Image: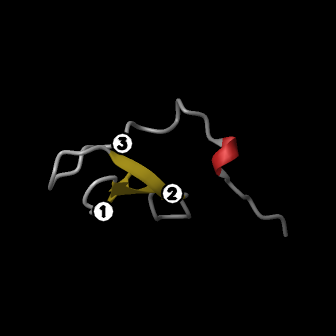
């Protein structure tokens, strides 16, 4: 059985959305991880604020 593997190197910058601003301090957030779509679960992006370390997830 072959498995499909998605890595950051296979994703182009066109496929990634712009990171949001922090809802607490309005500083830019950095993407710290992505969970690829698996069956019924959507693609999830994980962001962390560069100032206050607040963590935010976003489904795509």
Q: Quadrant of the N terminus?
A: bottom right
Question: Circle 2 is placed at which residue position?
Answer: 34
Horizontally, is 20 left or right of 25 in the view? right
| Label 3 or label 1, whichever comes before in sequence order | 3
Residue at label 1? 53
Q: Are marks 3 and 1 in contact (CB under 8 Å)?
A: no
**Comparing labels 3 and 1, the label whose residue is closer to the camera:** 1
For marks 2 and 1 on the same chain, the one whose residue lies earlier in the sequence: 2
Label 3 crowd bin: few (<14), some (14–19), many (20+), radius 10 Å: some
Label 1 neighbourhood size at 10 Å, few (<14), some (14-19), many (20+)? few
Please report whichever mark, 3 or 2, sits nearer to the chain's N-terminal start: 3
Q: Is residue 24 left or right of residue 58?
A: left
Horizontal and vertical percent for residue 43? 47, 55
Q: Residue at x 51, y 57 (%)?
A: 34
Number of the front mark, 2 or 1: 1
Mark 2 and mark 3 in contact (Cβ < 8 Å)?
Answer: no
Residue 47 in picture, x, y percent from top left: 38, 55
**14 up-or-down from 54: above or below:** above
Give neighbour class at mark 2: few <14, some 14-19, many 20+ (Cα, 10 Å).
Answer: some
Say what secondary structure mark 3 lies in: loop
Q: Using the image, tell me which numbered label, if any, was put on residue 19.
A: 3
Could one spot residue 43 in this view of the protein? no
Residue 12 to residue 9: above or below: above
């Amino acid at each position: 059985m072959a498995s499909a593997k998605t890595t950051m190197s296979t994703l182009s910058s066109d496929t990634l959305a712009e990171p949001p601003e922090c809802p607490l301090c309005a500083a830019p957030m950095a993407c710290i991880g992505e969970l690829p779509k698996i069956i019924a679960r959507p693609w999830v992006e994980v962001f962390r604020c560069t100032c206050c370390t607040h963590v935010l997830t976003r489904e795509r």
